[in-house]
Image (cartoon, rainbow, N blue to C red):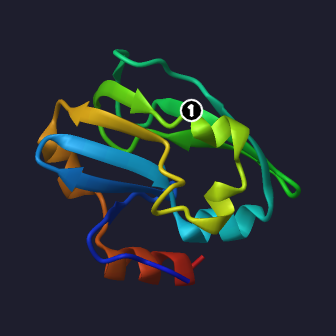
Amino acid sequence: MNFPKDLKYAKTDEWVKVEGDIATIGISDYAQSQLGDIVYFEFAVEPDEEVKASQTLGSVDSAKATAEVNFPVSGTVLEINESITDDVEVLNQDPYGKGWLVKIKISDPAELAELMDAEAYEAYCESR
């Protein structure tokens, strides 16, 4: 399993890469491996939308299940990775690179303290 050290992770299996006040968000390698082959992704937000932590970002369908993807932090949606809807396999192939979902401007940086580092997330995944 792949747990990049420069990311923060939520208990709901989203990852966050923070660069200044911008957060790039996606689903973790652990999440995509649990779901199996992902066949469809639908966004539940639009650019410029204000979002809150734990709000639904979108839903992912796989051969095994349908799951909601949530925002791990609050902010304003800057960009949506629209290419995901045309090439959803990238979520399985490159969840931390081309498989990013959204970029937001963080409105409450204190929320980042509630997320796990790679080591804590790896231990969390192993405990489930």
The residue that label 1 is drawn on is 82
- Find residue 118 and report its image quarter: bottom left
**How would you rate the neighbour count of disc 1 (Cα within 10 Å): few for under 14, some for 14-19, many for 20 or more?**
some
Number of numbered tags placed on the structure image: 1
Q: Nearer the viewer, residue 110 or 48?
A: 48
Residue depicted at 46% across the width and 76% down the height? 124
Please, what secondary structure does the residue beneath circle 1 have? Answer: loop
Q: Nearer the viewer, residue 73 or 29?
A: 29
Where is residue 6? Give x, y as percent: 26, 71
Locate residue 21 relative to residue 125 in the image: left or right: left
Locate residue 40 relative to residue 2 in the image: left or right: right
Q: Is residue 69 above or below residue 8?
A: above
Q: Is residue 77 above or below residue 28?
A: above
Q: Is residue 29 above or below residue 57?
A: below
Where is residue 125? Give x, y as percent: 53, 76
Q: Quadrant of the N terminus?
A: bottom right
Where is residue 77? Give x, y as percent: 35, 26
Residue depicted at 50% across the width and 21% down the height? 45
